[in-house]
Image (cartoon, helix red, strand yellow):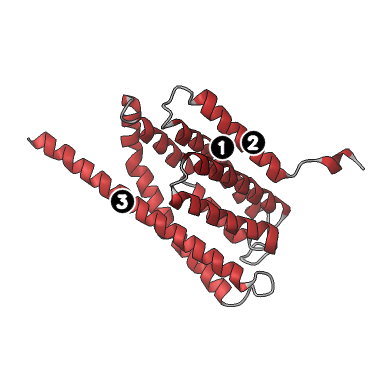
């Protein structure tokens, strides 16, 4: 046997990488943060390591595939991106199970996302185009969202964090609303039209693509509800500030 035969699977290597980043975040980068905020900050740390790189890798893998379609076979590069994303969600799922076991919504989100990615990568070997476009749409707001989340965690303790939180909120909410409220639903509509036509019957079983649609629609609906609450909260905060100034 050659030495290359003993190489570790990419999924294991990616998981080890995210685990190491999480440990560095928890015990080094955020060591002076409170026990309440350190886990959340460490989760943001691995999300930063996943989000923008995954977006770039996914976009590159799709552009390199001249035969991409909703039912096209996954390329090696696309499978690698799927494994990179799977490793991140597995690591973040472990984080939530350990530190926030009562956060059923996020745990369910991660499990559903893993189901979609795992079935695409290891069961049907087709459809990475759809899954990776959805990944791009999900991660295009990742960097801004993580910076906003970190600022939110310290806004009551650090003046700069409070200022950054205030500056980031409107543009982040706007971008998030456009992506999750307009672009995302339009792309899912295209998925429904394609898969509903039966064009993928020979490559992707009906129960698989139907489950993908259900998961994505549920995720987008939850995202729209979440950002709607943020907009309402921002509106209330602005009104309180105006009331204080007019008194």
Marks 3 and 2, the one that precedes in the sequence: 2
Which residue corresponds to mark 1?
A: 49
Image height of 121 relative to 173, above or below: below
**Tag 2–tag 1 contact (CB < 8 Å):** yes
In percent of width and height, residue 111 lies at 54, 54
Front-lying residue, 208 or 57: 208
**Mark 2 Cα shell of 10 Å, populated few (<14), some (14-19), many (≥20):** some
Image height of 45 relative to 209, above or below: above
> Which residue is painted at 45% across and 38% down in the image?
146
Answer with left or right where residue 96 lies relative to residue 77. Answer: left
**Mark 3 Cα shell of 10 Å, populated few (<14), some (14-19), many (≥20):** few
In percent of width and height, residue 121 lies at 67, 57
For numbered disc 3, what is the local secondary structure?
helix
Answer with left or right where residue 165 lies relative to residue 9. Answer: left
Q: Nearer the viewer, mark 1 or mark 3?
A: 3
> Which residue is painted at 51% across and 68% down in the image?
190
Give me the disc on residue 17.
2
**Mark 1 Cα shell of 10 Å, populated few (<14), some (14-19), many (≥20):** some
Farthest residue to the left: give it.
247
Q: CA distance from mark 1 to mark 3?
A: 27 Å
Give me the disc on residue 229.
3
Where the N terminus falls, by quadrant? top right
Q: Is residue 125 visible?
A: no
Q: CA distance from mark 2 to mark 1?
A: 10 Å
For residue 22, which quarter of the picture?
top right
In percent of width and height, residue 239 lies at 17, 43
Image height of 196 relative to 233, above or below: below
């Amino acid at each position: 046997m050659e030495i290359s035969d003993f190489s570790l699977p990419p999924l294991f290597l990616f998981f080890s990488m995210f685990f190491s980043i999480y440990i560095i975040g928890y015990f080094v980068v955020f060591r002076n943060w409170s026990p309440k905020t350190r886990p959340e900050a460490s989760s943001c740390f691995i999300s930063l390591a996943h989000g923008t790189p995954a977006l770039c890798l996914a976009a590159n893998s799709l552009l390199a595939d001249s035969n991409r379609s909703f039912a096209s076979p996954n390329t090696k590069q696309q499978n690698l991106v799927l494994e990179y994303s799977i490793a991140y969600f597995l690591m973040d799922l472990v984080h939530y199970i350990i530190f926030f076991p009562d956060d059923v919504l996020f745990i369910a989100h991660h499990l559903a996302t893993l189901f979609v990615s795992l079935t695409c990568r290891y069961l049907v070997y087709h459809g990475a185009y759809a899954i990776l476009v959805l990944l791009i749409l999900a991660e295009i707001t990742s960097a801004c969202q993580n910076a906003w989340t970190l600022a939110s965690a310290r806004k009551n303790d650090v003046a700069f964090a409070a200022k950054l939180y205030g500056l980031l909120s409107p543009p982040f909410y706007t971008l998030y609303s456009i992506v999750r409220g307009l672009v995302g639903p339009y792309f899912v509509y295209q998925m429904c039209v394609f898969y509903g036509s039966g064009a993928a019957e020979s490559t992707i079983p009906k129960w698989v693509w139907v489950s993908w649609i259900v998961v994505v629609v549920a995720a987008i609906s939850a995202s729209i509800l979440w950002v709607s609450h943020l907009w309402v909260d921002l509106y209330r905060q602005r009104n309180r500030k105006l009331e204080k100034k007019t008194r």
